[in-house]
Image: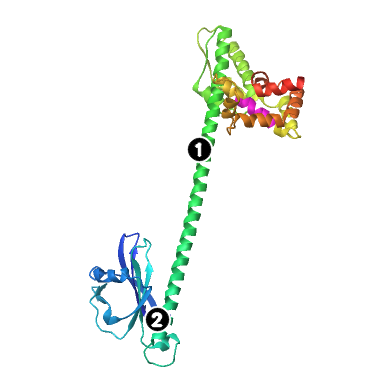
Amino acid sequence: MPGIKKMVTVHFDSSKKRITGILTDNDNGGYTTRELNIDTALPSLQRYMEEKSPFSWLSEQSLPFDIKKENNKLSIDIFSELQNIVLLIRVPDELNQLKDLVFLFLNENPSNFGVTNTVNPLTTDNKSIIAFLLFNTIKTFINGQNEDREVLKSANFRTRQVIAITENLKQELERTKDNYGLSLIKLCQNYIHDWSAKNSKKYVFTPGALNKIKKYKGDLKNLERIIAETVSYVDNLYFGVQGEIEISEWHIHLDTATGGKMETKTEVAREDKYAKTLALLDKLEKAALQVKSKHLKMTGTNVGAACPVPISAPAISDALYNHRGKINNLIKTHPENWETIKNEFRPVMNILKQENN
């Protein structure tokens, strides 16, 4: 603004945790900003910070400081007499305790402000208008900055929340995949235990075999057949060998359970109106097999907790009720599927019983 020669601000710097001073000076047509050492003048400045009035007009002679330069450093010292007037604007600080101070050093000549063409000193009315305009300009600027900062803080907070949720979902997905893999291992170990008892032999998986089973992505209902084929294979491979029989990863052919007629039938079924019902039955069958592998009760709560995204027992009942007609049709069409929930999971058994009645 024309007529402002320099400006001194005294404010609480939240990053430095102390009151600091800044000089903005007109230097060859441009403004430069430098820090001031206000330690010696701070006690005198504090009374200005405690006053309630939003602005005051002062003479430079009445100020408790002067600006001097020593060894290329600026500091505030006892004021000397100059031919300027000073407008002091007070702004509440961030802590709403003391006021931040803005000292505007103005020329005495009002023509710089376009108020008049005369060179006479500013009148009281001139000063009131200038003070009011500058006070509200600074207040509006600061309020805008504070609002922008709050908007930025809110946006940053929401962004951090999205990042945190994404990371949590990523970790949860990894845990779910890991838990699912461990459930596959336990299920296959149960199958091997049963075959060991049936054949009076001891079959054990090597770490490589367990890792291969853990990464299995096929249909759970095929695992029992895969293990049966694996046991038959190793029995023939180690015919006549006594003692423990190790099952390695290369003994297990997981791809034998995919493809062929069954895969084609599933793909065709999933393309029709039964897709959601098929997905529901498959999800419950997988969860039920996990529950069974852990030797837990086949309840709605346990099955719901074993689902990739846990669901409540009432939600399972509602979903089954809404799909009851399609469930019965699918089970009639594919009687070889979903053996566990058909024969051991009460909510599904009830739907089948109602249909038969």
In this rendered view, identify the residue nearer to me: 296 or 167. Answer: 296
Inspect the image, locate mark 2, and give the three-letter code of the amino acid beneath it.
Answer: Gly
**Residue 207 shows in this picture:** yes
- What is the spatial separation of the Cα atoms under label 1 and label 2, in whole angstroms? 59 Å
**Residue 335 shows in this picture:** no
Residue beneath the point at 42% across and 86% down: 112
Residue beneath the point at 30% across and 86% down: 83
The answer to whether residue 146 is left or right of residue 333 is left
Decide: is 47 above or below 300: below
Q: Which residue is mark 2?
A: 29
The answer to whether residue 332 is left or right of residue 30 is right
Helix, strand or loop status at disc 2: loop
Q: Is residue 147 magenta?
A: no
Quadrant where the C terminus sits is: top right
Residue beneath the point at 43% across and 77% down: 132
Q: Which residue is mark 1?
A: 171
Which x, y percent locates residue 237?
Answer: 58, 13
| Image quadrant in which you'd find residue 113 | bottom left
Instruction: State which region is magenta.
Output: 278-287
Give the main secondary structure, helix, strand or loop, of the magenta stretch. helix
In this rendered view, identify the residue nearer to me: 191 or 91. Answer: 91
Which x, y percent locates residue 299?
Answer: 59, 23
Helix, strand or loop status at disc 1: helix
Which x, y percent locates residue 277?
Answer: 71, 31
Decide: is 150 above or below 111: above
